[in-house]
Amino acid sequence: MTQNPSCRLSIVVPCYNEQATLVTAMERVMAIEEPGLELEVILVDDCSKDKSWELALGLQKRFPHLHLHRHQVNQGKGAALRTGIAQATGDFVAVQDADLEYDPQDLKKLIEPLVKDQADVVLGSRYMSGKAKRVLYFWHTMGNKLLTTLSNMFTDLYLTDMETCYKVFKRSVIQSITIEEDRFGFEPEIVAKVSQANVRVYEIGISYYGRTFAEGKKISMKDAFRALYCIFHYNAPYAPLPMQLAIYFVIGGVAALFNLGFFAALQALVPLDLNLSLGLAYLLAGLVNYFLCIMILFRHQAKWSGKVEFLLYLLVMLIGGGLDNLVATGLFGLGVGLLWSKAWASLVLFGVNFFMRKMIVFPTKPRPRF
């Protein structure tokens, strides 16, 4: 496949309780080595409770270029990959599971764009392949496609299979990424961080021989919800503008509910002057909005000190409140109905607030590059 120029491929294999498939999987991986393609295989046992580690030690005697690492406590697939990727020395780094769902022969096809310097990252898609694919769970497949679609909306990458195991990277790219997820959240996290690096991403169809849960499949509904969180968490500050506006709309909606709820509670439990109640409720809603912006949408390495940032935020709130009043009263004075005047003022305020927060209070930090 890659006879000229030659390359070295590091294959990282996370393993947890895979005694039924480990030997066959590793034999298939080792079989792809050929002239021009040198392998470095790094198997990380994530504190297996079965005989996986003993089998791995036996495999190392057969294959000297198999390197073994073992976690003393089970941490998850992402943690195992973090350990293995840090040890890689090849030109390229691939992820390979210790089961038999993927065909290692496909890795030779996946590294071609890397060898030719056409790509920096290549993903193997189970959904754009003309090759064999085992037919399994409908809803699991729909869940994968939904997660891929949501990931695409946030990353602005048009992938068909974000959750695929087969991801191959230039070593300089993957070792420059800080992997934070310990379990299956690795997949959406790594796609998010690759998209933010502005590297060249390719996708190639692969074969897929999925297994059932009875056969050892480990991913669960908990991991699906974690994937949703990861898509949101790792992408929000860098998402395309329409998605950032949508996120800010949700944040504003939550703050508005706090405003209304706190106002109603004050009126019911601690009767106060109407204007005082309105002011306190507005202040609480502003604080909620501020912290949600920091935690979700405008997560940042603060450009300002905390005090300066908060003062800028209060200034933006005052400008926004004044603009809201100016637009509403101006439209009402021109003969527009009171409710419509307020609605248009709120729409204008939404846009102005978003951009003032983005540009003044929480300046967007530079996108990381590798």
Image (tube, rainbow, N blue to C red):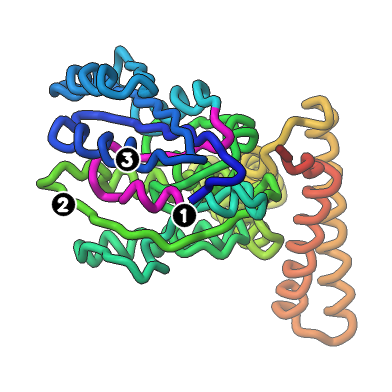
Provide the secondary structure element on which disc 1 rests. helix
Q: What stretch is highlighted in magenta?
A: 90-109
Image location of residue 77, percent across then percent down: 36, 33
Q: Is residue 108 rendered magenta in the image? A: yes
Amino acid at circle 2: Thr
Provide the secondary structure element on which disc 3 rests. loop
Amino acid at circle 1: Lys
Q: Looking at the image, can residue 271 be seen?
A: no
Residue position marked by numbered label 1 in the rendering:
109
Residue position marked by numbered label 3 in the rendering:
31
31 vs 345: above or below: above
Q: Nearer the viewer, mark 3 or mark 2?
A: 3
Cα separation between marks 1 and 3: 14 Å
Q: Looking at the image, can residue 324 be seen?
A: yes
Lower sequence index among marks 1 and 3: 3
Q: How crowded is mark 2: few (under 14 residues within 10 Å), some or many (20 or more)?
A: few
- The quadrant of the rendering that contains the C terminus is top right
135 vs 151: above or below: below
Image location of residue 246, percent across then percent down: 62, 62
Q: Is residue 137 rendered magenta in the image? A: no
Q: Residues within 10 Å of mark 1 (few under 14, many from 20)?
A: some
Amino acid at circle 3: Ala
Q: Residues within 10 Å of mark 3 (few under 14, many from 20)?
A: few
Lower sequence index among marks 3 and 2: 3
131 vs 25: above or below: below
Q: Residue at x 62, y 61 (%)?
A: 156
Lower sequence index among marks 2 and 1: 1
Cα separation between marks 3 and 2: 26 Å
Asked if the residues shown at circle 3 and circle 2 are in contact, with their CB atoms under 8 angstroms apart, the answer is no
